[in-house]
Amino acid sequence: MEQPRTHLVPGPTIVPQRLKDLYSNSFYGSGDLEPECLKVYNECCSRLQKLLSFEPHQQKQADSDDGSIVIMSGEAMAGLWGGLKSLIPWVYDYDAKGDLVFSKDLFANKYRVLCIGNGVYGDGIYDMVRSLRYPNVEVKAAQGPWDQPVNVEQVLETIHQWKPDLVTMVHCDTPTGVLNTEAVRMIGEACSKADALFYVDIVSSAGATPIEVSAWNIDIGLVGSQKTFSCEPSLAVITVSSKAWKQIKKVAYIGYDALLPFKTLEKEFPYTPLWSAIDALNEQLKATYGENNEHVQEVYARHEEVAKYCRERVKKMGLQLWWDQERVSLNSPSVTAIRVPENTTWEELDKKLRNEGVLLGGSYGQTANAIFRIGHMGTQADLRIVTYALDALEKIIMQEQ
């Protein structure tokens, strides 16, 4: 693929040269045999724990273990699927003879999943749960328009009345650039009071804006390596609360994407780990956020500064933000969504941008061809890169007027 001069797709983001060198010039042996790999893995978990304000002991119960972080091989979606299958019970099991038996109790007492969405991925989790086709699962969607905030009052009422076992949502739904921070906080509190597990996709927000996993009562927090952390799309990171581990052990799912085999990760991995990717993520966390997370506020400020500049420039061009006016607070510092001008299409605009060496992102689902996106996260939260792209965009817009 011919490399663009400016790449601002909202993930995967640009991998810095020093990580490319690490990937290509370092030989990693069999990580499941070498103690050095487990050492790096644990270091990485510790750094992520600080960055995400995840306190493993905070939610500990008398009959459960500490919370912990899981880093599995595979793009972030591996974690999303693995999280669901590790939490949702299957109605069949094996008896003492090894025969498959049907659990009448599990079938009678349905496992209820409430999926909250105001974007592609929030709504998509509902489709994921349904596609499992578990006969003992009832799934309900709390889906709203993709240009509106989550209807928190309605969701809280549903939690109170329907009493779900698991509630899912997305913090930053990248295809529309929405940041649902206040909704996550309030819904997490309601889940805690209702003893429901709270499963949250923080893939596009973690590292770009403050995340309070424990304070927001997030039981399963899902992260990827390819967004703000600017590594290859090779790792899924999952924060698992003590409450979630209790359910995971009860379900006992042990497929490749299962979380359970990582619970006793003390001497060996459940399968050959992607050592090079774990090492790269660990190095990136140190370089970006500091040995002890001392640069984290600087990173957040950089993302806010670049996002503000981007949006001000866009509005001066006469373009309209997807989240504007009274909804401006819903804009994520990691991505800006812009309405496609009425006198063109995204396909035409994308072609002209590519001719200028600029690669931006389109959108999907309800917003396909309605908006395009600038991904200013991780290494791309850089004023020089964003300025170059916006200069090209402005040139095209001026020519079409």
Image (cartoon, helix red, strand yellow):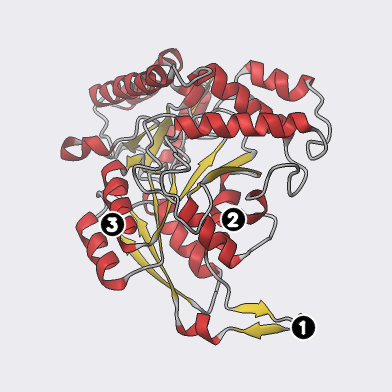
Q: Give whichever of 363, 32 is nearer the camera.
A: 32
Return the x and y of residue 268 as percentages of the image width and height.
76, 43
Q: Residues within 10 Å of mark 1 (few under 14, many from 20)?
A: few
Q: Give whichever of 233, 238 is nearer the camera.
A: 238
Task: Please say if 388 is above or below 329.
Answer: above
Q: Are marks 2 and 1 in contact (CB under 8 Å)?
A: no
User: Which of the two discs, 3 and 1, sits closer to the camera?
Assistant: 1
Quadrant occupied by the N terminus? top right
Give the mark, 2 or 1, whose residue is nearer the N terminus: 2
SS for dot 2: helix
Give the mark, 3 or 1, whose residue is nearer the N terminus: 1
Residue under label 1:
97
Q: Name, please, the residue furthest toward the front.
A: 62
Task: Please say if 360 is above or below 126.
Answer: above
Give the mark, 3 or 2, whose residue is nearer the N terminus: 2
Q: Amino acid at mark 2?
A: Gly
Q: Give whichever of 354, 43 is nearer the camera.
A: 43
Q: Is residue 324 left or right of residue 74?
A: left
Residue under label 2:
82
Q: Amino acid at mark 3?
A: Ala
Residue at image point 46% right, 36% down = 361
Q: Residues within 10 Å of mark 3 (few under 14, many from 20)?
A: many
Q: Amino acid at mark 1?
A: Lys
Return the x and y of residue 338 as percentages of the image width and height.
33, 35
User: Which of the two discs, 2 and 1, sits closer to the camera?
Assistant: 1
SS for dot 3: helix
Residue at image point 51% right, 21% down = 379
Residue under label 3:
190
Q: Is residue 187 left or right of residue 98?
A: left
* Residue 157 seen: yes
